[in-house]
Image: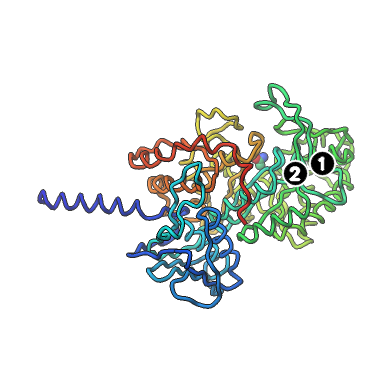
């Protein structure tokens, strides 16, 4: 090659690199993206053309524009030139969640086979908006359409998700989070195209859902008189009352808020363990009859629901009778994890039950407990999900398994032809620290961004047929050491962005280097949202990424702890 050709080849490479970086950063990476020439300019006069059935997409888009760019667009059903078209053509043969997004000089068109797909197309469109330069003092109103409009680059995207279950969990038992924050959390999910919110509503340290038949659950069980200081078992006690709960009206409101974002909420009512808040409210539910008090410390506690007492099952059925109608979800999570058998071993009622039923050990008593509850839930037309401990002693017939103690439970369940949701602690426990030098208090462990990004939800060792039982995966945020929303966001970001790509994008599209480039833009979005995040998230080898990130390090302290000032978006 001549010197000039070499120079030309180098120039092409450099220019291609520059252009590649200038395309908007879309996370999760769509299935198929073809950048075009030209652009569509959104001004204050641009209209949205949509049917009322796509209002959830339109409303989210407009509220996003209003909140972060200071304007919104007129919506009409009649077609129009120079418009943003939201259109859904119901297609029974399409892929669930599929959409196409086309941007040309004249129009933006989202076409989907379902309203849900339409919503995902709109989320991708949001990521084509220029991300405003952000300073702590000028959030919002930064790119006003009067100042030339917003340029959306020409592109054609065809996309649908890899997994049908794309989940995120929040423990509101160890610490209670207000409705406004739960809604914001749901927005973060929507912005990442996740579709299942696992709401961990009951715990040893707090019962968080109003049950009208049992008012003491929230009068007593929703409150504790203090919390340990530092790591379990604690160096002291803050002696500060902590608690709270959601009324049934609030739950309905949050469920609707999530449904408007095509997110299903799965409630978790924990049993037979992690139930001391319930025992403190109604001591006859425990093996010894109490007294019990809502614990200030964390870890696994020995006091659990009595499995030999029929009134415990009546109580749980009554609770489920109030919970199930609140949640349209076909799944109810019944917990099942970390249930020590000490109190059952010492309890005459539990032992008598085992004898009558010919159960060989307390694991089989736990299986009996779960199967009995499953039968009740199935009789109401719903399905149970349980943590992988419910495999021990025989799994309930129709249960879906959440594999959290590694991948083993998931493999075993899939081989037994049970549906599985993967949540292995090593890859998706977002209560683990993102750095080895974290000076904030976390539960321990180390889960850096690249480890989440490289996680593969289909475990090795499953054949193609068994792999079909893996519905998807979910990250869990246990809140022992997350006492306020800013801390939750700090643990969530940027790992949520990596998780979204694991769950949505084709396996072959996973590209850690490219993801790091796109993360530089994603950090600007976090800033735009006023979301807290873990900032020094990795040491990128790539100088260009380092430089981009450097520009955004400034606000890392400014954002902390201001969560209380936001209002919800919807
Ligand atoms: C769990 O982390 N105990 C499910
Ligand atoms: Zn008992």
User: In the figure, is residue 164 to the left or right of 513?
Assistant: right
Image coordinates of residue 22 in percent, x first then y, are 35, 53
Instruction: Give SS at disc 2.
Output: strand
Residue 135 versus residue 19: which sits nearer the camera?
135
Instruction: Give SS at disc 1.
Output: helix
Residue 95 visible, this orientation: yes
Image coordinates of residue 413 in percent, x first then y, are 62, 51
Identify the disc placed on residue 55: none
Identify the disc placed on residue 278: 1
**In the rendered image of this protein, does residue 147 appear above or below residue 176?**
below
Q: Are marks 1 and 2 in contact (CB under 8 Å)?
A: yes
* CB at disc 2 and ligand 1 closer than 8 Å: no
The residue positioned 45% from the left and 60% from the top of the image is 145
Instruction: Name the residue that disc number 2 marks.
Output: 202
Which residue of the protein is positioned furthest toward the left in this rendering?
A: 2
Which residue of the protein is positioned furthest toward the bottom in this rendering?
A: 78
């Amino acid at each position: 090659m001549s010197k000039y050709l070499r120079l030309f080849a180098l120039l092409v490479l450099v220019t291609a690199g520059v252009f590649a970086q200038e395309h908007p950063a879309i996370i999760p990476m769509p299935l198929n993206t073809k950048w075009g020439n030209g652009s569509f300019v959104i001004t204050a006069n641009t209209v949205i053309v949509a049917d009322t059935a796509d209002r959830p997409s339109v409303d989210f888009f407009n509220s996003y524009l209003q909140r972060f760019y200071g304007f919104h667009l007129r919506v009409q059903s009649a077609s129009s030139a120079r418009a943003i078209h939201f259109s859904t053509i119901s297609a029974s043969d399409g892929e669930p969640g599929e959409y196409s997004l086309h941007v040309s000089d004249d129009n933006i068109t989202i076409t989907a086979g379902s309203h849900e797909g339409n919503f995902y197309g709109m989320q991708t469109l949001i990521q084509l908006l220029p991300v405003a330069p952000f300073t702590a003092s000028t959030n919002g109103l930064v790119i006003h359409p009067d100042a030339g409009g917003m340029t959306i680059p020409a592109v054609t995207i065809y996309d649908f998700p890899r997994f049908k279950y794309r989940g995120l969990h929040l423990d509101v038992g160890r610490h209670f989070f207000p409705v406004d924050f739960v809604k914001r959390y749901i927005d973060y999910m929507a912005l990442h195209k996740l579709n299942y919110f696992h709401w961990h509503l009951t715990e040893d340290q707090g019962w968080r859902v109003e049950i009208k038949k049992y008012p003491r659950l929230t009068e007593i069980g929703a409150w504790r008189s203090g919390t340990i200081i530092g790591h379990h078992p604690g160096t002291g006690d803050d002696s500060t009352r902590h608690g709270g709960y959601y009324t049934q009206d609030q739950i309905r409101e949050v469920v609707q808020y999530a449904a408007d974002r095509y997110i299903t909420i799965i409630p978790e009512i924990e049993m037979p363990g992690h139930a001391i808040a319930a025992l403190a409210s109604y001591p006859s539910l425990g093996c010894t009859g109490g007294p019990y008090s809502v614990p200030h410390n964390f870890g696994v506690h020995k006091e659990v629901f009595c499995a030999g007492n029929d009134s415990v099952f009546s109580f749980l059925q009554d609770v489920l009778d109030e919970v199930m109608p609140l949640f349209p979800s076909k799944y109810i999570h019944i917990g099942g994890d970390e249930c020590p058998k000490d109190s059952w071993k010492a309890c005459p009622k539990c032992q008598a039950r085992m004898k009558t039923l010919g159960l060989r050990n307390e694991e089989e008593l736990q299986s009996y407990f779960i199967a009995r509850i499953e039968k009740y839930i199935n009789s109401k037309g719903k399905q149970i999900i349980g943590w992988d401990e419910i495999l021990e002693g025989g799994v309930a017939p129709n249960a879906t398994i959440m594999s959290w103690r590694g991948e083993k439970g998931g493999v075993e369940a899939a081989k037994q032809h049970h549906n599985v949701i993967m949540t292995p602690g090593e890859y998706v426990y977002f209560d683990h620290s993102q750095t080895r030098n974290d000076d904030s208090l976390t539960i321990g462990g180390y889960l850096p961004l690249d480890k989440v990004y490289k996680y593969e939800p289909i475990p090795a060792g499953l054949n193609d047929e068994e792999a079909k039982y893996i519905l998807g995966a979910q990250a869990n945020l246990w809140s022992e050491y997350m006492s306020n929303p800013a801390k939750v966001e700090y643990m969530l970001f940027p790992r949520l962005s990596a998780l979204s790509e694991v769950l949505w994008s084709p396996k072959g599209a996973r590209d850690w280097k490219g993801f790091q480039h796109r993360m530089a833009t994603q950090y600007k979005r976090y800033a735009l949202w006023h979301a807290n995040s873990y900032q020094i998230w990795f040491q990128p080898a790539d100088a260009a990424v380092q430089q981009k990130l450097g520009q955004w390090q400034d606000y890392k302290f400014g954002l902390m702890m201001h969560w209380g000032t936001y209002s919800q978006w919807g």
